Image (cartoon, helix red, strand yellow):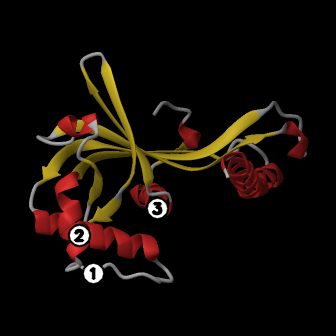
Amino acid sequence: MYPPKHHQDYSIENIKEVAKAYPFSVLVSAEGQTSFITHAPLIFQGEKLVGHIDKNNPHTKLLKDNYPITAIFQGPQTYISPSIYTTKQLPTWNYIIAHATGVVRQINDPNTTKKSIVTMTEFLENPDQKFILDLNDPRMDRLVPYIHCFEIEVQNWEGKFKLSQDKTPADINNAKQELIKNNQKSVADFVNNLFEKHF
């Protein structure tokens, strides 16, 4: 991602925290002039990222053989109105983004695939795990043939945390509160409206 440098986060651990807190990623690959974009959760297994998608997804042909890939993790983001600042400013947009670039390999072993699904379920159920997925559940054996499991060896992490760092301490705090408030409100409003239209 491009500068300005004051919007970059150079702590790999900080950047990884975005991926852990917001694991639903955007996977991006390219073959010639064609882009392949898939949304899927990814979790850490050691330093690698592991995920699964439907075997019929055309993207699977690029999710193997050390093919280049980028995974994008989007954290909170919002419009920032100049009205919240104590100083004169222009409108802007604040956000937290992490990019993981590397190479991807297919996981072919059915048992390893099943174990990775169990591990992902445990991670996503935390911190108050209410459901435990049984590795020996016969439904898992029926599911695995339809799953494309893969792991990403991350070669580079990039983090862009645009948080009004170039403003006064009071304005930085106001922008922080706006980021929190707007994300909570916008999610609730959007989901409620969507359900009203569809149900």
Q: CA distance from mark 2 to mark 1?
A: 9 Å
Residue nearest the observer in this picture, 197 or 144: 197
Is there a contact, CB below 8 Å, between mark 3 and mark 2?
Answer: no
Residue type indicated by callout 2:
Met
Q: Which residue is mark 2?
A: 140
Whether residue 148 appears in this view of the structure is: no
Question: Which of the pair 20/142 is nearer the observer?
Answer: 142
Chain-order first, disc 3 or disc 2:
3
Neighbours of disc 3 within 10 Å: few (<14), some (14-19), many (20+):
few
Query: Is 12 on the left-hand or right-hand side of 75?
Result: left
Please state which of the two labelled residues, at mark 3 or mark 2, is closer to the viewer: 2
Q: In the displayed structure, would residue 48 be above or below residue 46?
A: above
- Give the residue furthest to the front: 199
Residue 1: x and y in percent read 45, 34
Residue holding disc 3? 17
Q: Characterize the local packing of mark 2: few (<14), some (14-19) or many (20 or more) Cα atoms within 10 angstroms.
A: some
Closer to the eye: label 1 or 3? 1
Q: Which residue is mark 1?
A: 134
Name which residue type carries label 3.
Glu
| Quadrant in the picture for residue 197 | top right
Question: Quick one: label 2 or label 1, which is nearer the N terminus?
Answer: 1
